[in-house]
Amino acid sequence: IKDITGNLYESIAIVARRANQINITIREELHNKLDEFASHTDSLEEIHENKEQIEISRAYEKMPNPAILALNEFMEGKIYYRLNNDNDLFR
């Protein structure tokens, strides 16, 4: 991890920011899919019987952790990043 940027802290910071972006995207997708099932007049019985909603939630629970996805992208060189210094640009 350190070899890519030359600094372990910078590499971890890059991966953490990308993991946050992935997490936000996944969360938005999940909320959009679950909003289709939202009903404010459901009784408790109707809420427990919605199998499609449960399957969607389970599928998202089985997805890899965003940090793992971000680390894989970083190691494969799929993340564009740059330092704030004008002279130091990376991928």
Image (cartoon, rainbow, N blue to C red):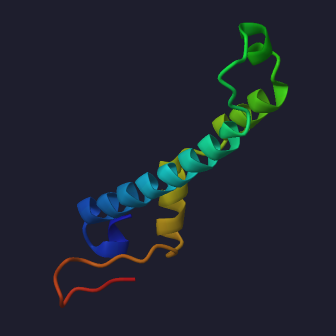
Tell me where residue 5 appears, x and y as whole percent. 31, 74
Q: Is residue 8 left or right of residue 60?
A: left
Q: Which residue appears at 18% of the width and 88% of the height?
A: 86
Q: Which residue appears at 52% of the width and 74% of the height?
A: 78
Q: How many marks?
A: 0
Tell me where residue 29 appears, x and y as whole percent. 62, 49
Q: Which residue appears at 45% of the width and 54% of the height?
A: 19
Quarter location, residue 41: top right
Q: Quadrant of the N terminus?
A: bottom left
Name the residue at the bottom extreme. Answer: 87
Q: Relative to residue 75, is residue 43 depicted above or below?
A: above
Q: Relative to residue 14, is residue 16 depicted above or below?
A: above
Q: Is residue 81 left or right of residue 47?
A: left
Quarter location, residue 49: top right
Q: Which residue appears at 26% of the width and 65% of the height?
A: 10
Q: Relative to residue 31, is residue 7 depicted above or below?
A: below
Q: Is residue 34 left or right of residue 7?
A: right
Tell me where residue 32 appears, x and y as whole percent. 64, 46
Q: Quadrant of the C terminus?
A: bottom left
Quarter location, residue 15: bottom left
Q: Relative to residue 12, is residue 31 depicted above or below?
A: above
> Which of 8 and 49 lies nearest the eye of the viewer?
49
Tell me where residue 50 appears, x and y as whole percent. 81, 23
